[in-house]
Amino acid sequence: MHAPIWGHTKFGCAVGISLRDTFSMKTEIQRFLSQARKMLSAVGPGGTVTISHGPVLRSISADDSGIPLAMPSFSSAPIARSTLIDRLDALLAADQRRVLLVCAPAGSGKTVLLADWASRLRDRADRRPALGWVSVSEQDPGAALWQTLREQLALPKPPHRPSVGAPGFDAAQLVETLTVRETPTVIVIDDAHLITEPLALAGLEHFLLHAPPMVTTVVSGRFDPPLRWHLLGLTERSTRWGAADLAMTGAEIAALCREHHCELDDAELATVLDLTKGWAALVRIAAMYLAANPDRSAALAVLARPPRAVSDFLVGELIGALPLNVRLFLTYTSVPASFTQSMADHLIGGGAAHTLYELDRMNFPVTSIARGDDIWFTFHPMLRAYFLAEMNRLGAQARSELHLRTANALRAAGLPRHALTHLLDVSDPRHLRGFLTECGTTMVLDGDGAALFGELHRARPSLLDDPFVWLLRVLDALFHGSAADALAYLDVAESRRPRPSFAPAHWIDALTGAATVDAAAATGSVSGHLTVDTAPTGNPDIDCYLAIQSATAMADGGRLDRGEEMLLRGLALALHAGHPRLALRALTRLTFIACGREATASMRDRANRALVIAAEHDLLDTPDAAQAMTAAGLAAYLRGEQPDPSHAAAALAHHAVQDGSESPLAGWHGYVIGLLLAVDQAPDRRAAIDDLRRGTQLLLDKDTAPGATAALIPHVVWALLGMHEPLPAQLLAERAQQLLGDLPDIVIARAAVAEAAEHSQAALTLLAPLLAGMDVVRPSTRVTGWLLYSSAHHRIGNGAKARSGLENALRHAAADHLLRPFLDVPNAIELLDVYAGRFGRFDAFGDIVRQNRNAARSSTHPALTDAEMTVLKHLPSGRTAQQIAADLGVSINTVKTHLRSIYTKFGANSRVAALDYARRSGVL
């Protein structure tokens, strides 16, 4: 025999379940009905308990000890609700006076839980409280409630009751008797929502307020009895449990299904939990369906409709007694998955506030949650499914009108994705086309492009071939980093342009121009001649996107100042319109402009601002965020700082495109930057260098964005030279020259190879024309050129030109804090040591470079001991050996011994010579 339905010990109308429309369950239904009849008349050893809404008060007999002899009984043990039982036990063990209100719809398992708990209390060997249980009938209970409790608790009869007594006299007498007795007592008043008579309510309120500390009272009902519950709440004497507290957990649902010989896998269990929300009676019905039908997928699909068994239960116990206007309200407001009061007013024509209040008063299962400035209401899934079925009976025209009203309300609430679902059920196609025109771009920019195209493919596939929709596909692909898909969609969109579109023609022109620039930027094929000449459309989404792409075309055409100005305008528009994706893209493009100038502070600040927006709006896995992290890592690299490992990882991340291939999330240039950043952090630097070399060769083969590619070549050449790979460095520089020509960065890479091979004259020959026009090259290239010039002249013995080259390098590097060239060029740090103090106002920056933790020097002397370093640091003070010894607390002979060792290691014969060497070598 199966365990009973939770909560079905109190009602009979839900047990007449008919499953013939869906399953062949005749035998199972007969068993269930037989079981239900037994549940409706449970017999105990001390008497008969009527567990239905009968005409008389249902009571439980008691013996002289006050312990009930009969409790609501079941044909088999209920599913253990151990967590709830523990909570009830904790309530009983509390020190203060205790009142628990258990308020939940029919079938939630209230009575079964409380009866199970009461049975456990009755069976205790020790600390067993006196127990009273009263189930209220639909008739006016009057004084019988308190008399029944007296009988169950074996309390003496009260003095003669006056014919005209004060309200609550019987309750007050019971309070007085329980106070005198001082016995731990548990009282359960079930179906308390049926108490409606004012005197009875007054008595119940008096009892709850004044019951002695050793009494725990549990009031259970479908909705709150109309008492002044705030009086109990203010004194912290009451606790309230609702449907959410009583909802069955996944483990409990699985156990109940097993009783029906129905084993659910994790996915099936999750579906049942989602459909029923743990509502016990519905869980039981679901278990019966699933047990009877071997096709689980079909059974779960039927449960979602819902089946007749669920409808019978809902109508009989929840919906049947509702007024017609409330049922219409529930039918109309079930169309959206959730709704606000203003949306409900729009759907029903006003008066939603009163109906929502009434539903709340009767504890109808409607959940509410605050989102922004609104409260959103949601029906239980099976309740909503029932009312949706009712809505479908209204006729096609009424259904279409309700879906249109819902779509308009959702659009007004800023939820176009949800509005689209309802517009697809509107009969007039003009509404859908108007929605796509006004909100299609918004959905794509909000990241809902996949949902948009999926819904159209499902319900309106013909619209997918509209030129405007193809352009939306281009936009969606670009924001997901699928440049190849974007180019393919753009070609289709261009071929469809002669066809009429539901969108205005000038919108098509604007989007086409902007998307063309965006696709070119994504593939690195932007040319200086590419422009966007269309005027603003009046659509804020399109105009914002248009401004960003116009600025991109200007920046790539060399008009950085004008491009930056327009990007700032586009950023302001994006923030005002609430489009974080566009704001992120604008900030990423602003970061690119800073990268072009190698303004490292701006690179870092703009990238960090972009990443803040990405983190706030869950966009950290987008190509724009990856590019911002790449730029932040490059800024740290150029400044001689340690890049954040997560930035290098973002640059190296890949994602799959539509054809199944993979491409770097940050683009191929970003990928090579990531390989470059990873070299210093890699446990196997040799393998990392090989990856960098291969990645750079692949980038060269792609023949995209020559200027951006050329800018990376010197950095990669220095990384190869730093790992003593002169031949691969030379081959890479020569191949770059063949493919990209004699761009300044390529010339610098070739000069670096020559200087590393000690071919200083060849390096100077390469540098001569470049140094004459240094104003047109990027800062790091300029700094590297002067450092190579200085190194070459130092090698051939021309000290004056070596010093002037260093000074020029410091001048061009100081503004943007470009330390990296000094760390790359061989002997640059040693040269700064040699000429330290001779650069005037640039000495300070020179000292910063020399003190950088990544600065490497080729040391030609043994290292000093700690004691020798301590003495050396005292020499610039000019103090004598005797004074230094006194300062250090050692003998003068110890100081002299350290001085002799320092002079020997430095090859010096005096204090002045030792200090000069220490400064030139970077020791000081």
Image: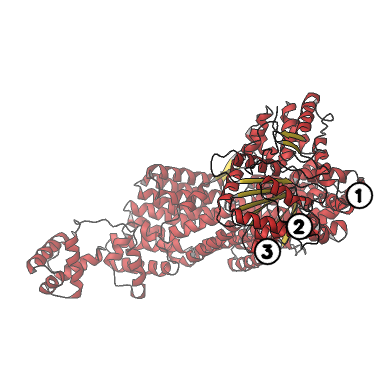
Find residue 455 and report its horizontal and vertical position in percent. Answer: 77, 45
On the picture, is 393 further left or further right than 235?
right
Mark 3 or mark 2: whose residue is earlier in sequence: 2
Mark 1 or mark 2: whose residue is earlier in sequence: 2
Mark 1 or mark 3: whose residue is earlier in sequence: 3
- Mark nearest the camera among 1 and 2 is 2
Front position in the image: 8 or 386: 8
Say what amino acid the circle numbered 3 marks: Leu
Q: In which quadrant of the rendered image does the C terminus lie? A: bottom left
Q: CA distance from mark 1 to mark 3?
A: 47 Å
- Mark nearest the camera among 3 and 2 is 2
**Tag 3 secondary structure:** helix
Q: Is residue 501 above or below residue 120?
A: below
Which residue is labeled 3 in the image?
A: 231
Say what amino acid the circle numbered 1 marks: Ala
Say what amino acid the circle numbered 2 marks: Arg
Badge 2: few (under 14), some or many (20 or more) residues near its Cα, within 10 Å?
A: few
Q: Is residue 401 above or below residue 45?
A: below
Tell me which corner region of the image, top left, top right, bottom left or bottom right, holds residue 369: bottom right
Q: Residue furthest front?
A: 160
**Tag 1 secondary structure:** helix
Front position in the image: 634 or 7: 7
Q: Residue furthest left?
A: 893
- Residue 398 - label: 1
Q: Are marks 1 and 3 in contact (CB under 8 Å)?
A: no
Q: CA distance from mark 3 to mark 2?
A: 28 Å
